[in-house]
């Protein structure tokens, strides 16, 4: 039996989080945070089925580069308690195929882009019988 779950969380500096670290973790990549001078390396993370970025047509080309996107999000906010991104966690039924998970998640991301004018960084994580899509949106719009 398929179940549905959606939670939205903020990535904010006052909680000690950064958009660059969250982006690197979600995608299983290595991103250097230019604001902090720290390197976030999650290249050993397993269970990542697919990653992609959906951005508005008016967004600059660098918005498709994960490191550039999240460093720009960090740079655009100057307050020490700023919200630098929002994280949308969406559970996906394990009964559906990887292709269907990808399509559902892409459509969800496109709706966020259309409605809010933000870039959406998506990572689909699949472990054994559970799957979830974690989408992060930039706070600045394009």
Image (cartoon, helix red, strand yellow):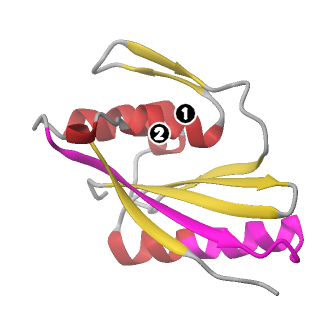
The residue at 38%/39% (across/down) is 19
The residue at 17%/44% (across/down) is 82
Residue extending farthest to the top is 37
- Circle 2 packing at 10 Å, graded few (<14), some (14-19), many (20+), is some
Count of numbered circles on the image: 2
User: What's the magenta region?
Assistant: 81-108
Secondary structure beneath dot 2 equals helix
- Image coordinates of residue 25 in percent, x first then y, are 57, 36
Q: Measure the C-alpha gap from mark 1 to mark 2.
A: 6 Å
Please tell me which residue lies in front, 141 or 7: 7
Q: Is residue 88 above or below residue 18?
A: below
Q: Which residue is mark 1?
A: 24
Please tell me which residue lies in front, 16 or 85: 16
Q: Quadrant of the N terminus?
A: bottom right
**In the displayed structure, does residue 26 sit left or right of residue 113?**
right
Residue 38 on the magenta span: no
Give the numbered dot on residue 22. 2
- Image coordinates of residue 51 in percent, x first then y, are 68, 49
The residue at 38%/78% (across/down) is 115
- Circle 1 packing at 10 Å, graded few (<14), some (14-19), many (20+), is many
The residue at 64%/82% (across/down) is 4
Residue 105 on the magenta span: yes
Give the numbered dot on residue 50. none
Secondary structure beneath dot 1 equals helix
């Amino acid at each position: 039996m398929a179940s549905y779950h959606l939670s939205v969380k903020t990535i904010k500096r006052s909680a000690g989080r950064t958009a660059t670290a969250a982006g690197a973790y979600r995608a299983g990549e290595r991103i250097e945070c230019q604001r902090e001078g720290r390197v976030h390396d999650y290249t050993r993370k397993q269970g990542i089925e697919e990653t992609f970025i959906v951005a508005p047509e008016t967004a600059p080309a660098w918005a498709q580069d994960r490191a550039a996107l999240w460093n720009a999000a960090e740079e655009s906010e100057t307050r020490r308690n700023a919200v630098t991104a929002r994280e949308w966690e969406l559970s996906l039924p394990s009964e559906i195929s990887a292709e269907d998970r990808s399509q559902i998640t892409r459509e969800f991301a496109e709706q966020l882009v259309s409605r809010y004018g933000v870039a959406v960084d998506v990572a689909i994580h699949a472990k054994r019988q559970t799957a979830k899509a974690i989408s992060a949106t930039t706070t600045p719009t394009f």
